[in-house]
Image (spheres, grey):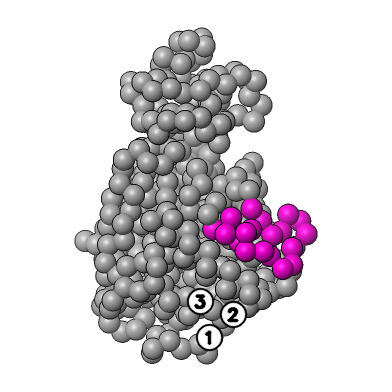
Amino acid sequence: MQFLPFIIAAGSLPLISGAPVASNLYSVSADAESTHSLSGRSTNLYAGIFGGDGLLSQGWPSIENWIADFDDMWDSNLDVLRSSCKSQGWGDDNTEEEIGHIRKAIQQVSSDSNVDSRFIMAIMMQESNGCVRVKSTNGGYNNPGLMQSHEGSHTCNDGTPTFPCPYETIHGMINDGTTGPAGLQYCLKQEGGDDSTTYYKAARVYNSGHVDGSGNLGLGGATACYASDIANRLLGWGSGPSKCNANEIGSMSSSQWDGQTDSGSGSSGSSGSSGSSSTSASIPAATETFAPSTVAPSVPQATQTTTESTPTAAPTTTQAPTPVVTVTPAPTVVPSSAPVPAHSSSLAPGGNYGKYPYASKSCQQYYTVEANDYCRKIEVQYGITATEFQSLNPGLDNTCSNLWKGYQYCVKA
């Protein structure tokens, strides 16, 4: 992920080459053909180029169009999971035991967080091609692990690859990217829906920290093709190059897709394994359940590194799949300022969550946000302007509508 002012997380390394890649990831490219076949599916197929706002009316796929279940999605990405480390210079390739740990961790975190396991898998493959020893990217904020999460605390490559990578660390990497401050759970909650469009928007937020003001998911910095790549991964794309052109996707207002999945049908059958459903996967309602409620500041992704996706073995931004693709992790993008100061703030549930993740690193004094607090009140109390308060806490939008209760915000640096 890569975010700060805006959450740009996951999605930092290119995964675009072999298998569908995540947007923030740097790219890995490799158009190797996969001999893997799943019920007639061609895992090399990049089904369509999705432009616009992520709406069904613009040709984006519905949840019913997604690959039927997690088991099928898992099988279509196995070749990439087995060859995504060494080719990138991240150490030995995943062992069968480590691959089993990844599967178990995704299903467990999906069950605990209520985030569709297919969505978690798609983001992971986009960001790191599933290499447990993927390197961290850093553009001011650390984006480590399988999900290239924003300021995550788990990795099996802190400069020296860890072998073998233990289950606890693998679970931690998946959990950091899913339930962390700028994780998928937060991004979904921020978009506040329960349909496929919410997932595509959440993917864009995870990659660049925010959805562009125009609503176009091909704009907004970081990896332009991120949302389109994720949509393809959810349709079953597992390897082969991305057909999305980063220089053109932002100007598209509709999609180039015939409505067919890689299995040749317009919709997938029944839902499968834990955490996924072929119909609407439950997305956390916009209730104050997770730390940041309302809009989550886009987590800065190290630096916005745009990478084209092509599934294969590589982390985010660039997509690399089955064949081993060369992925270059991309830093989390730091969102740019948002709206105009608002009187009320959206607060997360009570409790002290510690320092606001996007506060200035040179901060000398903090203030813990309480119920009924709002930016102007804090600014007056500490004698600072709205501009100063926002510069000390880059994740705040221009309207200061995303103040998080229980977090310590910087008031002096």
Q: Provide residue 175's location: percent of width, then percent of height.
A: 53, 54
On the image, numbered disc 2 is attached to which residue? Answer: 323
Question: Up-down: is 141 above or below 46?
Answer: above
For marks 3 and 1, give the CA distance.
Answer: 10 Å
On the image, numbered disc 1 is attached to which residue? Answer: 34
Residue at disc 2, secondary structure: loop
Q: Horizontally, is 293 left or right of 164 in the view?
A: left
Residue at the image point whose x is 30% and y is 46% from the top: 285
Q: Which residues are magenta?
A: 154-174
Instruction: Identify the mark nearer the N-term, 2 or 3.
Output: 3
Residue at the image point whose x is 31% and y is 61% from the top: 281
Viewer-side label of 2, 3 = 3
Amino acid under disc 2: Pro
Mark 2 Cα shell of 10 Å, populated few (<14), some (14-19), many (≥20):
many
Seen from the viewer's position, the closer of residues 49 and 180 is 180
Q: Provide residue 101's location: percent of width, then percent of height.
A: 58, 69
The answer to whether the residue labelled 2 contacts the one labelled 1, judged by CB atoms less than 8 Å apart, is: yes
Viewer-side label of 3, 1 = 3
For marks 2 and 1, give the CA distance.
Answer: 7 Å
